[in-house]
Amino acid sequence: MRITKVTTKGGDDGQTSLGNGQRVSKNHLRIHAMGAVDKLNSVIGWTRSIAQSGIKDDLEKIQQDLFNLGGELAVSGGDQELLKKTRLEWLEIESETMNKELPPLKEFILPGGSELSSRIHIARTECRDTERTLVALGEVETVPDLQRHYLNRLSDYLFILARKVKNDEGSTEIPWDYNE
């Protein structure tokens, strides 16, 4: 695909085109889902901008996955399969591997830490938001299971990654003090 023109004026009336040419309201749930995926991708890109090479490379792969997911969303009712199950499996394996290196959680922890771990937590919460938007779309249209599963695993991966970054930096996790 080659983008030769960004400004088309085709959306000035509050409508936009899906990849199959169908015109829908810019307030359509599918457009909200596409926008949520785009925002998540941008937050991950912002996070990647300060990450070291290993994490940076993994986050770039995730950004590619999110573009594929967004591409699938752009074609309503399409049979386009861009996001592959192997990417979901990769998230599961990476999450399990990282989690084995971390001390077990005994209680909820406060998100935060260094700038990188804080950005990863922001990406995680954005991922949960995106997942909820996709679930809402799935209540009125068919949404492939893989899309929801991927976002669910991605938020887990990001939580574990934020913990790993904080642990690797030697920072202590702060437990939630529910008595205060």
Image: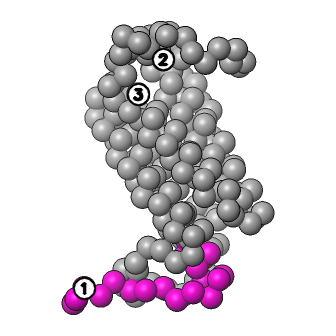
Secondary structure of the residue carrying tag 3 is helix
In this view, the residue farthest toward the right is 53
Is the N terminus in the top left, top right, bottom left or bottom right quadrant?
A: top right
Residue 51 drawn above or below residue 81? below
Secondary structure of the residue carrying tag 2 is loop
> Marks 1/3: CA distance?
39 Å
The x, y position of residue 117, in whole percent, is 56, 71
Residue assigned mark 3 = 31
Residue assigned mark 1 = 178
> Marks 2/1: CA distance?
47 Å
The x, y position of residue 65, in whole percent, is 62, 43
Q: Main secondary structure of the magenta part?
A: loop
- The residue drawn where x is 62% and y is 75% is 165
Tell which circle, 1 or 3, labels the residue nearer the N-terminal end.
3
**Which residues, given as a range, are shown in magenta?**
162-180
- The residue drawn where x is 49% and y is 29% is 73
The label number, if any, that marks residue 18 in the structure image: 2
Q: Is residue 175 magenta?
A: yes
Q: Is residue 6 magenta?
A: no
Q: Rate crowding at label 3 as few (under 14), some (14 to 19) or many (20 or more) other CA atoms within 10 Å.
A: many
Residue 91 drawn above or below residue 162? above
Q: Amino acid at mark 2?
A: Leu
The x, y position of residue 3, in whole percent, is 68, 18
- The residue drawn where x is 72% and y is 18% is 2
Q: Quadrant of residue 178?
A: bottom left
- The residue drawn where x is 69% and y is 64% is 51
- Would residue 106 be found to the left or right of residue 158 on screen? left
